[in-house]
Amino acid sequence: MGNMTKTKTRSFRLAISGLFLCLCLVGCSSSVSQESLKSSKVVHGARPVAERQGGNSGLVSNGKESVEKSSPKPTRLSLRFDPPQPVTGDTLRAVVDFGKGGEPTDSSLVVRWTVNGKELEQTGETLEHDLVYGDFVTATAELMGTGNQPRRVSASVVVGNAPPVVSVLDETLKEGEFSATVDIRDPEGDPVIVDLSEGPEGMFWNDEMKAIQWRPAPSQRGVFHVKLEAKDPAGNAGAYSFDVTVTEPEGGAPSREGTRP
């Protein structure tokens, strides 16, 4: 499975003990062709074939249309998922494409859902179900027209593992030391490994306090990039990045200004 990274954005300014800190947190169907079909003939499209995709979604099958009755100008159906590779907690939609002609005016579309082999009572293009890692989801779109047999297209996807979510809850400045309290959550509840992969000398991750801490030295001036990463057992990573700018304070008095998203 490939790694996945999510970032946040945040900005504020600090000055501590004769040093002025300005933090800019920058998160960091196929379709079935018909050739001169007779009205009494029934043609079935290829069944969906699962194939391995990249990333964390596991098995994905492309929608294949099954045609139960010929028509003078059949509508070509295809179905895809949004997002194409869902993970735990995502909201999944089935997007049906009717081809160049668009959706026929004399027809109605129904989308049915199956999760882990169980057909759900709900219908509609948006799945109203809490997705978790490993769920096998199938959507079947059925186009029904007046006087015609319904036309169907299906697609399936396996829900992938979501990366940890990293966010800063609070920033404090006390006696010349900067501290940022961090919240780290894994959607599957897996244990995570936290790493301060980038930061100025003297900055460290306090695992007991769940905080980034730093006391700048008098010689430390300029812009310092900071990046905190959290990885789950599947190798997925969530990250929080920001820049710290250290300058001389104005007026000689410590101050703090900030904006939050």
Image (tube, rainbow, N blue to C red):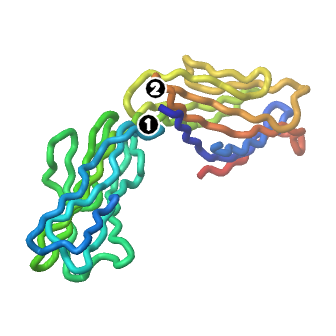
Q: Sequence-wise, which precedes: disc 2 or disc 1? A: 1
Q: Position of residue 76 (x, y in %)?
A: 30, 69
**Do tag 2 and tag 1 residues touch (Cβ < 8 Å)?**
yes
- Left or right: residue 205 compared with residue 64: right
Could you tell me which secondary element the residue under label 2 belongs to?
Answer: loop
Q: How many marks?
A: 2
Q: Position of residue 176 (x, y in %)?
A: 77, 27
> Would you place residue 162 above or below residue 90 in this image?
above
Choose between 57 and 214: the one closer to the eye. Answer: 57
Q: Residue at x 39, y 41 (%)?
A: 87
- Left or right: residue 179 compared with residue 97: right
Q: Residue at x 48, y 34 (%)?
A: 163
Q: Residue at x 57, y 37 (%)?
A: 168
Q: Tell me if mark 1 has few (under 14), some (14-19) or many (20+) residues whose alpha carbon lies within 10 angstroms of its own.
A: many
In space, the residues marked 2 and 1 are separated at their CA atoms by 9 Å
Residue type for callout 2? Ala
- Left or right: residue 119 compared with residue 100: left
Q: Which mark is residue 156?
A: none
Q: Which residue is mark 1?
A: 56
Labels 2, 1: front one: 1
Q: Quadrant of residue 40?
A: bottom left
Q: Quadrant of residue 195?
A: top right
Q: Which mark is residue 234?
A: 2
Give the farthest residue toward the bottom. Answer: 105
Q: Residue at x 89, y 39 (%)?
A: 248
Residue type for callout 1? Asn
Choose between 45 and 192: the one closer to the eye. Answer: 45
Res 7 seen here: yes
Could you tell me which secondary element the residue under label 1 belongs to?
Answer: loop
Choose between 82 and 149: the one closer to the eye. Answer: 149
